[in-house]
Image (cartoon, rainbow, N blue to C red):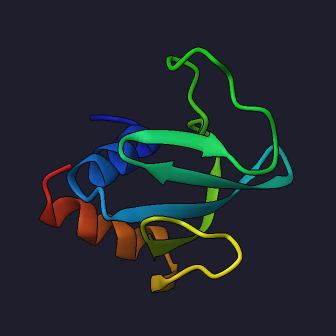
Amino acid sequence: MNSIGKRLEQYTAKHPQEVLLVTVEIADEQDTIAIFKGFSSSLMRPTAFDADVPVLPAGANILNIDRVASPYNPEAPRYIQQGLSWEAMETLLLEVRV
């Protein structure tokens, strides 16, 4: 089974009109990760150049996920859905078979 991060990346590869903003807790620090067209990037900390280094590590606690219309404008985001739980997002992932 693919990691959560890889599954979210696969979802955005299948839905290029969406950006996922994932609020997570990693080692007692909160982070926001943007996932778009199959790639992840932290909005709050440096992202490794090596694509094999996961931006969303296995031990991360997902607090919520926002689905935003692309192109993403941080000044005026166009939300599709806000505050999704991991369980709600997992339902969407299963629907698109990722």
Q: Which residue shows up at 51% across the image and 20% down it?
A: 51
In the rendered structure, the answer to whether residue 69 lies left or right of residue 42 reads left
Q: Position of residue 33 (x, y in %)?
A: 63, 52
Q: Position of residue 48 (x, y in %)?
A: 68, 22
Please state, as top left, top right, bottom left or bottom right, where the N terminus lies in the image.
top left
In the rendered structure, the answer to whether residue 11 lies left or right of residue 87 reads left
Depth order, front residue of 82/49: 49
Q: Position of residue 61 (x, y in %)?
A: 64, 55
Depth order, front residue of 81/26: 81
Q: Please tell me whether residue 53 is drawn above or below residue 91 in the rendered image.
A: above
Q: Please tell me whether residue 76 is drawn above or below residue 55 in the rendered image.
A: below
> Hey, which quadrant is residue 77 in on the image?
bottom right
Q: Which residue shows up at 61% across the image and 35% down it?
A: 55
Q: Position of residue 15 (x, y in %)?
A: 25, 59
Depth order, front residue of 93/18: 18
Depth order, front residue of 70/33: 70
In the rendered structure, the answer to whether residue 50 lies left or right of residue 44 reads left
